[in-house]
Image (cartoon, rainbow, N blue to C red):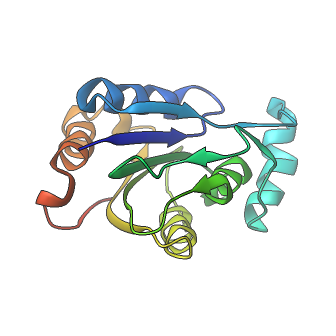
Amino acid sequence: MKTIIVYHSFSGVTRGIAERVRTASGGDLVEVRPVQPYSKLTAYTLGGFRARGRKADAVEPVSIDVSAYDLIVFGTPVWAGRPTPVANGAVEALVGAEGKKAVLFATCGSQAGDTLPQLRNALAAKGVGVIGEFSFSAKELQDTLKVEALIARVTAGDEASTAVGT
C-alpha cells in the first residue's frame, strides 16, 4: 500500500509522530508550511483566532497530489480546539483525493476539541473516507502503545476496521 503522510508542525511534536509513521510505513512525507510563517506570539493569537474561524492559510506546497497513493495520513497540532489554519490549507491543497482513505492524528496540550471531526468533514468534502482517528495529549505522547496503535492502523490500511484512538 502506497502511503503519504501530510502534516503541519509548529513546535516539532507533530513532525516527530509523522516521522515515526514514515519510518514504520515507508510512506512519503510532506510537511506543509504557511506562506506567511507564525511567530510564537502570532501562533497563539492570530493562529488561534483563524483556527476558531476555520480559516485556511496559503500553504507550501501549493498543491499536494495524492492521486498515486492508497492512504493519506494527515497530522496537525490543535490550536483553539481545532485544526491549524495551515492544516486547513493543506486539505484545500489536496489534489486527486477522491476515493482515497485517510488516517488522522492530532497533537495537543490536553484535549483535541473539535479537531478530528472538523478534519474528517473537510476531507469527506474532498471525497476522502477516514478509517482511523488518533489524538495525542502532551501526556499521551509518552505512551508508546498509543503511538504504536496509530502506526498499526496505518500499516494495516483497509484490512482493519475503522479505528478511533482518542
Is residue 77 at all visible to an observer of this figure? no
Q: Residue furthest front?
A: 68
**In the displayed structure image, the side of residue 92 where residue 142 appears, left or right:** left
Residue 77: x %, y % from top left? 57, 44
x then y, percent, for residue 54: 73, 67
Q: What is the quadrant of residue 81 in the picture? A: bottom right
Taking depth in this image into account, of 106 and 56 the one nearest to the observer is 56
- Up the image or down, 141 lies above or below 129; here it is above
Relative to residue 99, is residue 77 depicted above or below? Answer: above
Whole-percent x, y for residue 65 in the image: 56, 47
Point out the image quarter for the C terminus: bottom left
Residue 53 versus residue 57 in the image, above or below: below
Q: Quadrant of the N terminus?
A: top left
Which residue sits at x=15%, y=67%?
Answer: 161
In the rendering, at what x and y percent does residue 96 appear? 52, 58
Q: How many marks?
A: 0
Q: Residue at x 60, y 39 (%)?
A: 8
Camera sees residue 49: yes
User: Which sits in the foreground, 67 or 19?
Assistant: 67
Residue 165: quadrant of the picture: bottom left
Residue 151 relative to residue 117: left or right: left
Residue 104 figure quarter: bottom left
Residue under the point 32% across and 52% down: 70
Above-or-below relation of 155 to 40: below
